[in-house]
Amino acid sequence: MKRNEIADKYKWNLKDMVASEKEFEKLFAEVEAKLPTLEAYKGKLGERSSALECLKLFCAVSEKFELIYVYSHMHMHEDFSDSAAVGASNRTDALAARFSTATSFLNSELGSLGDGKLAAYISDPAFGEYDFMLKEIERNKAHILSDREERLLAMGSEALGVTSNVAHMLYDADMKFEPVVKDGKKVELTNESYGELLADGDREVRKSAFENLYDGYIAHINTFTANYAGNVKADNFYAKARGFNDCLEKSLFGDDVPTAVYTNLIDAVNKNLAPLHRYIKLRKKLLGVDEQHMYDLYTPIVDNAEMKLPYEEACELVKTALSPMGEEYVGLLDTAMKNGWIDVMPNEGKRGGAYSWSSYSAHPYVLLNYAPTTEDIFTLAHELGHCMHSYYSQKSQPYAKWDYQIFVAEVASICNETLLDDYLMKNVKDDKIKKYLLSLRLNRFRTTLFRQAMFAEFEYNAHKMDLEGKPLTVDSLCGLYLDLNKKYYGDDVVSDSRIAYEWSRIPHFYNAFYVYKYSTGMTAATSVARNILTEKGYVDVYKDKFLKAGGHKSPYKILCDAKVDLATVKPYDDAFAFFNDALDEFEKLA
């Protein structure tokens, strides 16, 4: 369907962001004109008046630039065949590089101020809007090296960062796999098609996809091992060079998250593997196989029982399910659904998938490609969680403090999904649909909380081995991974020998200690949802301390303010209780 064939009520209204192309060009020119003015403050930030003027101007220009950047890219996402929209997006990309160059001196110059000047700025009420930004610069000062040392690190960054590029070249360009035979025809096997083939109902298709894919990785395993070992060594080198105890501390330092959060995740999951093993055992029973293999873990164990709701009915369901959030929240959802905040339907040339995006100066937006499926109902609730988080943060924080960090970015969205899940389980009468929903919940926990924690444990141990001087070889890395796989999945699945090589196909491992955020995000969101459903008055705490918090302090502290401390056992107790409740109910229906 072409975009002009879709009713306006199913399209977002970007004029709420930028009213016309004329306004876009005006804003673009204003940002462009201010770049030399910003750059002229270089070398003057030691003067109080100049520093304050520079920060005010920086935020004012940033706010305008953010507006046109988000607008131009969202306009392009409506239809990639619109050459004018693509051109505008490319222009803002180029402007972004110029803006970054013009303001690159800010952090380093403020960080190098002596005589307590930065501390004086932080305590000065006139700098109140920028105090967290300045505190972050001060917090980083201990790990900023001399000019000569910083230059040396910068000079070496391209060479030390090459391992990620090598990995992606292997993943995306060089890796070739034997095709899979499906329905008597050869089907191309790629990293992208692997997931779909692994969920196929034909066990021989799944087995063939699994074996052919890993045979491809095994053929290159010496290259992958040498490359990943180099990446780990580079991680540990940077950590030592900047005065951190290890790479874990350095990686979590950016979000100001204590390392106890990471180790607590691994400890908590290790103490709660019994319910995962119970789920794996139940899968084996429902599949009716003598041996359950790793390639059997992604095929559905419940017949598809879709809730095929038209979009309007899906909206009403989501609003009802999220009613525990209160009238104001539901009213905002209704506004988003009826007033051009959401681009609903797929059309030719439109970007696939779904997202929520916003700029400080306009209400948030949501992109969907809605189809009447259960998954898309949950996607609607999920993206509206992001949308409401952004809305409340925009309305409650100044520009310099409104944007929240990735560590907490999925909490509001998964919380919405959890509330929808809870509502459906309490109100759906059809056992087939209920069973299907339970299977989705259990699988989400397996692939997000448990599996990402296993990845986190692998990364932790691999970096520790290198620090201890133990060589990272094919045998040591594959042995480590296979032992973890056996521990996490238990005795009711065969940890096929090929699964030992799975670590080599995880691109996130080249961004050290990132994947744990998937596990902690789901844990925090589940804990928040349980608090909403069980604690009187908690909704107000969640709104005031989390949704409205933006990025005015560290994301870990913001979660603690919302009564979710990921360095304690409580959030994990909540999450595993939610998993166990689903498992108990699923066993009754199975």
Image (cartoon, rainbow, N blue to C red):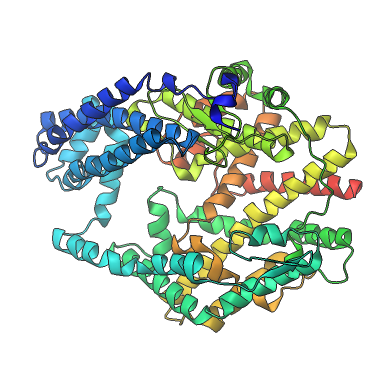
Which is more toward the observer, 220 or 128? 220
Against 3, residue 290 (above or below) is below
Measuring 20% from the left and 34% from the top, which residue is drawn there?
A: 121
Instruction: Give the image quarter of residue 434.
Output: top right
The answer to whether any part of residue 528 appears in the image is no
Against 154, residue 480 (above or below) is below
Instruction: Give the image quarter of residue 551.
Output: top left
Q: How many marks?
A: 0
Q: Position of residue 563 (x, y in %)?
A: 56, 36
Against 534, residue 483 (above or below) is below
Considering the image in quadrants, where does the N terminus appear? top right
Q: Position of residue 189 (x, y in %)?
A: 63, 66
Is 438 left, or right, of 48 in this rendering? Answer: right
Is 345 left, or right, of 299 in this rendering? Answer: left
Measuring 26% from the left and 44% from the top, which residue is drawn there?
A: 97
Q: Position of residue 2 (x, y in %)?
A: 57, 31
Is 523 left, or right, of 556 in this rendering? Answer: right
Which is more toward the observer, 190 or 114? 190
Measuring 41% from the left and 47% from the top, which residue is drawn there?
A: 255
Q: Position of residue 536 (x, y in %)?
A: 67, 24
The answer to whether any part of residue 70 appears in the image is yes
Which is more toward the observer, 139 or 372? 372
Which is more toward the observer, 224 or 47? 224
Instruction: Give the image quarter of residue 153.
Output: bottom left
Is 523 left, or right, of 54 in this rendering? Answer: right
